[in-house]
Each structure stands twice: as structure tokens, then as C-alpha cells.
Image (cartoon, coloured by chain):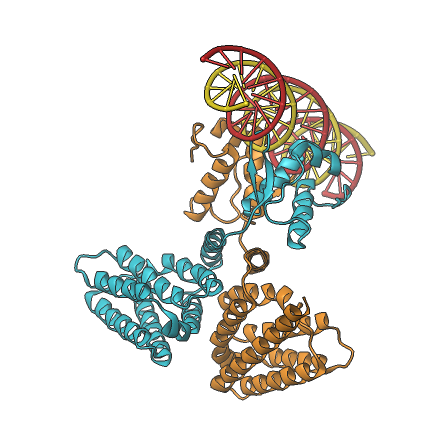
Chain colours: A orange, B cyan, C yellow, D red
DNA sequence: AGACTTTTAAATGTCTGACAAATAAAAATT
DNA sequence: AATTTTTATTTGTCAGACATTTAAAAGTCT
């Protein structure tokens, strides 16, 4: 592991890259302790402050964790699915909000991904996940529910659907797509009639999942996508007309 | 934006969180300049070194960029799809390698996601993307190709397929899944016969995409998934038998 | 006046040395 | 033997300094 003092890049960035590469290459294994900051400083021939900045970069990506005290130090972190989820959600959320991704594009991606899960969910979902879906449908039917709460319940419903596939990689990939859409969804106001339509479709989908009919679930999701896009188009058209 | 000096969390982590929240909430917009490090140090009542550690955390996530000089400083970065791609790829790669995700699980996720793209690709792919797919198929048929090169070409083929959907959000989500599988794929040795089978399926899929038949492309992908899983099962079984 | 050069000021990048706080092991005490 | 105290190690934080980069301001020459 070496760095180039004449490079244009910051020393702290180079240190972070060097250590990250070592982790990715498997030269540093999970729970292995890195040399102490002072030792690293000597190895890289930089000050401790610079080493620390490099280590903080890695900590931000959950690649290492640090512990104080006599036997403390920086340890290679086992990247958990939870850590990866939350990182993906912030990234996806910012990506959508900063790059003016259209509602249609995001919506299309989300439902395409969900359709990918549906057949797996239909054959593997547990009773628990099914119960969650039914519970969220019930909640969505409650009068007086705010639009935010309705959206949150919608996310929970879809999350259960996705988790039903019992494939952690799929769940992880989809968490970003579904959650990142929430800010966009929150821009929509749902009339009682809209909600009723969505509820019917949610029920159709859940019934399909329950009876193991993947195709029907896919069809239900397609119908829901069309409904959602029409709804959004209406909202945006009305908003544009107001100006 | 405030921090709690009595919290258990590091001050630098709190500062990073506070600024990140401000960005996500839209209080800080793209290309806006943050206060200088000295000013932030005064605002948060911490030393400049601590502020810097916090800023490096954000830089590691491409949320800010820094510039030296008179008009320099830290600026809110527009998170590009490229940045998001590469972050997702490292995260996904580490997630798979560190959590002993089985080949089957990763494979299932990958093909489920690709099938989600296929119908969109069939209706939207450009001539260019189709040409890339054909070119990669041709390369895969060349004799003397190493297994690594074969896998790399396979990734390029699937990448073109995914990009054909012309949905940047989908491409972004899938980049991680497909690329993260490469190390796993590289463990497999392909016989000439295996390659021929894969080539045939790639051709079937490409033909389907070219003629706009999404269903056929999906079927081809399913067949390819089965083939890949059988192949991997063989390899792993043989390896286990050797011991 | 305009083009060029020099100076200056502001900002990040890096270094040094110090102290605080946490933590586990070693030493001392009961 | 159990408990308490000390000690050593390591990260977290701070303060101040200097180096480097950069753009704007000031100065100089034609």
C-alpha cells in the first residue's frame, strides 16, 4: 500500500483509496484491525491528521469502524445489508432530486423492478408478509389519513411485497428505488376516489400473491403503474394550469 | 444546523449528518457554497480539524466537492449517475463478498432485474445498443478467449441490454447487480460447449430484442438463468468432490 | 486606456504537538 | 482470591502554524 506525494489528489483521498483497494482485494479481511493512526502516519509518511481524514472517508462508507481505548483502533467492517440499504436510499433520493428525474422515469423503473419480484413473492411469501400487506391495505382505507401517511403505508405495502421474494439482494436493490420515490409521491394529493382505486388494485395484487399467481400479480402491478402515472399526470397538469 | 456535544457520536460524524440532512432537505442546493472551514468551526463550536473530518465524510459520498484558492471552499455536488454507479458497484461487490451471498441468490436477483428491463429494451433499444450486443456475441465466439475476458464481454452484453431500456434509474440500479456478480462469475470455467450454449441464448435474446418481442427476450433470459445456475452447480459440485 | 505583471488576501491542504477520554491489561492492595 | 488502582495504548479533539492554490486587486509599462 503506497501513495504518491506528487499526485494531484489529496493525500487523505489517496490513503482512503489505498486502504479501500486492500479491502476490496481481500488483503484486509473482515474484523481485521488496521495499524494504529500513528503507525499508518509513519507508513504513509504523512501526519496523523491526514491519516484520520482518510479513515473518516472510509467510515462514511461503513467500510471501517473505530473503537477507542487500549485494544481499540480501526477495524474492517462487515458491510451489512442494513448499512447498504440506508446508503442506497440516500444516494437514490439525492440522485432523483438533484437530476430532475421525471416522475414517469422513476415510476417506470420502480414498477419494472417490482414486477421482477412478483413471481418470486407469489411462490415464497410467508404468512407474515401477507399479513403485513393486508394490514397496510386496511390502513390505507381508514378515513382521515393524511397523504403522507397514505404514501408511507404504500411504501410499507410494497416493501412487504418485495421482501416476500426472500432474496436479500433483490430487497436491497429495490429498497433504494421504492424509498427514493417517496418524496415524488408525496407531491401528489390523493382524492378519496383515487385511494379507492389504488386499494382495489392492492387487494388484487395481494390476492394474486396469496394464491401463488405470479402472472396476475404482475398484471396488477402494471395496472397500478398506469393508474399512478395517470394520477401524477393529472396533478402536474393541474399545477401547470394554475400558473 | 446544530450538534449535541454530549452525544455519544463523534463530533465529526454529527457535523456530517447535520450538513447531509440540510442537503437532502433542500436547504442547501446544488453548487451552493458552504461556509469556510473556519466559519463552520465557529458555528459548530469545534476545531477546524473536526470540521474537516466531517467534510471528508461527505466528500467520500460525493455529496460535496472542495476547491482551493481565494474563491474556493466546499460546494454541494450534483450527484451524477456516474458517481452513483461507481458507489453502488463497490457497495454491492463488498456486500456480496463479505456476506457469503450464494451464487444462486445473486444470480436469481440479477436475472429477475434483467427480465424487468427486457420488455422496455425490446421497444426502445437503439441500433447502436443492438450493434454492441451483436459485437459482444461475436467476441464471445472467438476461440482462445480467456474466462475473464468471456465474463467481461458477458457483462458488456448485459449492460447494453439494460441500457436499451433508456431508463437511467433502471440502468443505475442494475449496474450494481450485474457488475457485483462478476467476481462470482469469474470463479466459473466455461468449456467450449458451455460457451456455445450461452452464445445461442444470447443470440435468441438479441433477436427478440431486435424484433421487439419482449416476451421472447424474457423467456430467453429465464433459459439463460437456468443454464448459468446449472453450470455453477456443476462447478461447485466438482470442486467439493475434489476435496 | 489597455495589457501585462506583481501583490495580496482567502481558502483548503498538511504538519506538529498537545491534552482529553475511553478501555483493557497489568500491578497493587485487601 | 477478589477487588481496586495504576498504567499504557489508542482514538477524539484542539490550537496554532505553514504550504499551496487561486482569483481578485493593485501596480506598472506601453
Among the 4 quarters of the image, the one containing residue A147: bottom right
**Front-most of residues A141 and B209:** B209
Q: Is residue A229 left or right of residue B138?
A: right
Q: Is residue B124 above or below residue C22?
A: below
Residue A167 visible (yes or no): no
Residue at horizontal 48%, vertical 73%?
Answer: A112
Q: Position of residue A110 (x, y in %)?
A: 53, 70
Q: Is residue A121 left or right of residue B10?
A: left
**Front-most of residues B190 and D17:** D17
Q: Position of residue B195 (x, y in %)?
A: 23, 67
In the image as oriented, which residue stretches furthest toward the left? B143
Among the 4 quarters of the image, the one containing residue D6: top right
Q: Is residue A6 left or right of residue A197?
A: left
Residue at horizontal 59%, vertical 66%?
Answer: A181
Q: Is residue B87 above or below residue A46?
A: below
Q: Is residue B203 left or right of residue A42?
A: left
Q: Is residue C15 above or below residue B205?
A: above
Q: Is residue B21 above or below residue A201?
A: above
Residue at horizontal 49%, vertical 36%?
Answer: A15
Q: Position of residue A228 (x, y in %)?
A: 59, 77
Q: Position of residue B19 (x, y in %)?
A: 67, 46
Residue at horizontal 38%, vertical 74%?
Answer: B123
Position of the C terminus of chain B, as image quadrant, is: bottom left
**Front-most of residues A55 and B153:** B153
Amino acid at each position: 500500500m503506497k501513495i504518491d506525494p506528487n499526485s494531484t489528489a489529496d493525500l487523505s483521498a489517496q490513503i482512503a483509496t489505498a486502504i479501500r483497494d486492500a479491502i476490496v482485494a481481500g488483503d484486509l479481511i473482515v474484523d481485521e484491525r488496521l495499524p494504529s493512526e500513528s503507525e499508518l502516519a509513519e507508513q504513509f509518511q504523512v501526519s496523523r491528521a491526514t491519516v484520520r481524514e482518510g479513515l473518516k472517508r472510509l467510515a462514511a462508507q461503513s467500510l471501517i469502524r473505530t473503537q477507542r481505548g487500549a485494544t481499540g483502533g480501526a477495524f474492517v467492517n462487515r458491510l451489512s445489508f442494513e448499512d447498504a440499504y440506508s446508503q442506497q436510499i440516500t444516494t437514490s433520493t439525492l440522485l432523483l432530486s438533484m437530476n430532475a428525474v421525471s416522475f414517469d422515469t422513476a415510476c417506470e423503473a420502480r414498477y419494472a423492478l417490482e414486477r421482477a419480484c412478483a413471481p418470486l413473492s407469489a411462490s415464497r411469501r410467508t404468512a407474515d408478509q401477507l399479513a403485513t400487506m393486508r394490514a397496510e391495505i386496511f390502513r390505507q382505507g381508514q378515513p382521515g389519513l393524511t397523504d403522507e401517511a397514505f404514501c408511507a403505508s404504500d411504501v410499507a405495502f410494497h416493501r412487504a411485497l418485495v421482501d416476500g421474494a426472500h432474496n436479500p439482494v433483490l430487497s436491497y436493490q429495490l429498497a433504494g428505488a421504492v424509498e427514493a420515490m417517496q418524496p415524488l409521491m408525496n407531491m401528489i394529493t390523493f382524492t378519496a376516489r383515487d385511494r379507492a382505486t389504488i386499494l382495489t388494485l392492492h387487494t388484487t395484487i395481494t390476492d394474486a400473491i396469496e394464491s401463488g399467481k405470479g402472472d396476475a400479480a404482475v398484471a396488477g402491478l402494471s395496472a397500478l403503474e398506469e393508474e399512478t402515472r395517470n394520477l401524477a399526470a393529472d396533478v402536474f397538469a393541474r399545477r401547470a394550469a394554475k400558473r
